[in-house]
Amino acid sequence: MQIKKMKFSHHIQNYFPNFKVSLFKTINNKNLSLTYSVPSKAENLNEIIQWPTNIFLILYTLVDYTDKYRLLVAPQKHFKWDRNNLNTLNLLAKEWDTFFGGKPLALGSVLIKHLNVIFKRKNFNQCVYDLINSDSGFCSSLFFVLLSIDRAFEDNNLKKFDYDELTNIEVALLTRMVMKDLYDSSPKNSEIALEPNIADNDTRYGFVSFKSLVPQSGLTINNLCQNLTFIKPSVKPQIVYNNTKNNSKRYNVLLLPWPYEIRDEYFSSSKVKPIETDNYFDFFSYEPMENYSELSKSFMSAIVTCMKRVGQIDLIVLPECSLSQVHYDRLRDLLYEKFKDNSPSLLAGVYGRTPEGVGINKAVLSFIGASGDFDYISQNKHHRWFLDRDQIRTYNLATQLDPNKKWWEDIGVSRRNLVILDTSNGVKLCPLVCEDLARQEPVAQAVRSIGPNFVISLLLDGPQLENRWPGKYSAVLSDDPGCTVFSVTPLGMTLRSTGSGFSPSRVVGLWSEPNKPSERIEIQDEGIGVLLELSLSETQCWSIDGRVENKVIPKKEFHTTIKDEYSDLNSSLIRTIFLKKS
């Protein structure tokens, strides 16, 4: 039986299924003009390539499919890449910038020349392996065009949408967003994010997204590009921007490891069974009981203590399932009431129930958006927690949950998404919820592709020790993509993790950053939180084509316990302290 070869036209149709070879015409500076939004059902390739990230999608997935990105560091007879090619990349990136500015490319454009080598009519009927292995110049032109698009999106050309100084690419992206909103009749989401796909293919086939870090070891497709990447359709990327103006090279994080006490009755056999199981399996629910009055007092007390110590808090973090949605919203409103558009971002694990009674477990992140409002975005947990006999013993839960059964968390599993918060001083924050740190699929592929520089994992777990599972999986991400990872858990869980013979622990966090041993974050007696003072250091990241860009990595300088020193402060005094600091 003869195996059918993947033709170039078939590869394009994987992402633009209505593409017809017969409609294509040779590219010139008259029929190549910027189009802000191309229909995913477009039939004419001349129309499809008028938005550059569509070209990136076609070429990036081609070198991934064929495994030919390795040619950049493992040359063959028909192709060799050298550093002199970087000069050509820079020239092509300038042509792309002109194109994004809406101006026609010049006669004799080098960029158009390379595009015509790639999209030559006779190429569409050829096997992609034969094309990329041929001496026709296809391989060279492919890398020049692919990498020049990536180069055009260098971070210097994306200034976080500062409306006083927009770049050509930013104007094009914003115009594209407006046009899509005008013609998109689907319901709008109240959560604020850039469109998840900056290409025009149907997202059932994947997403083109922005990228930050490049792994500095190994040889995978993630080593290829600096600024753009492709995400498989199983995970939806959502990038949001914190509009708080902050050019500081410091970033201060307040961890509140709530609840401080976790009682037996917070765990129970669930009344809702998401799926039918036999007697060997069952479902449990976890719902802590909160005293909002006490929460809000210690919340503001911790904030004031931190402000008096370091002047500004950038992020407040609470562990998995630390707040109900109602109490999260109250704390969020309290922050905005006191601090307005200087409010620190608030990241917390939130629990609840759907109208059908199914459990909810998600990370919710609030931040100052482009309008100056306290916007929010959420990310559901991707994997259910699984409690077995050993964990039931460790957490002393045998009176609540039968240790002879295996217990699944009673949450739903919805569409997987991955949130990235991009700040003006270079932090790319990515929350994960418990099991999502440990499971390699599907979200780990997206994390490694996008390369955030700061992953915070919200856990409902025991002491955060380097030899336990959070330490092992954090170390993997610290190597690839090379990010800092901070895992956090409630003090109440570390204190009750004594069933295996260990003493109560106050280690509520584990800090892992590249090229350094992991560090335990312990809260002292009578502490209500931990303040982490970070520096935002630049490090060089190389891609396999020889380009190097400076990338920000959060590094911890100090951490100190915060005690409840100001719980009796009235709100006017809190406001006065804040105004003095601002």
Image (cartoon, grey):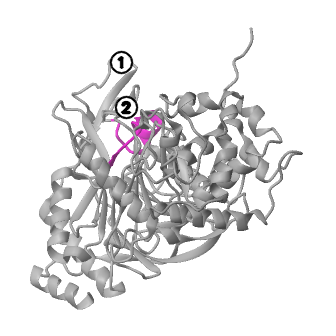
Q: Quadrant of residue 568?
A: bottom left
Rendered view: 123 above or below 378: above
Which percent across, then down, holds residue 50?
Answer: 49, 48
C-alpha gap between disc 2 and disc 1 = 10 Å
Could you tell me the amino acid type at mark 1? Thr
Disc 2 secondary structure class: strand
Relative horizontal placement of residue 167, taking residue 301 as reference (left or right): right
Residue 63: image tag: none
Q: At 52% from the left edge and 53% from the top edge, which residue is drawn?
A: 450
| Quadrant showing the N terminus | top right
Which percent across, then down, holds residue 419?
Answer: 39, 53
Whether residue 349 can be seen here: no
Q: Quadrant of residue 494?
A: bottom left
Kindly indicate whether the residue at mark 1 contacts the one at mark 2 (C-beta within 8 angstroms): yes
382 part of magenta stretch: yes
- N-terminal of the pair, mark 2 or mark 1, is 1
Q: Which residue is disc 1 drawn over? A: 277
473 part of magenta stretch: no
Per the rendered image, the range of residues in magenta is: 379-398
Nearest to the observer: residue 570 or residue 526: 570
Nearest to the observer: residue 108 or residue 371: 108
Could you tell me the amino acid type at mark 2? Trp
Residue 408: image tag: 2
Disc 1 secondary structure class: loop
Residue lying at the far top of the rendered structure = 1
Q: At 46% from the left edge and 36% from the top edge, which residue is drawn?
A: 234
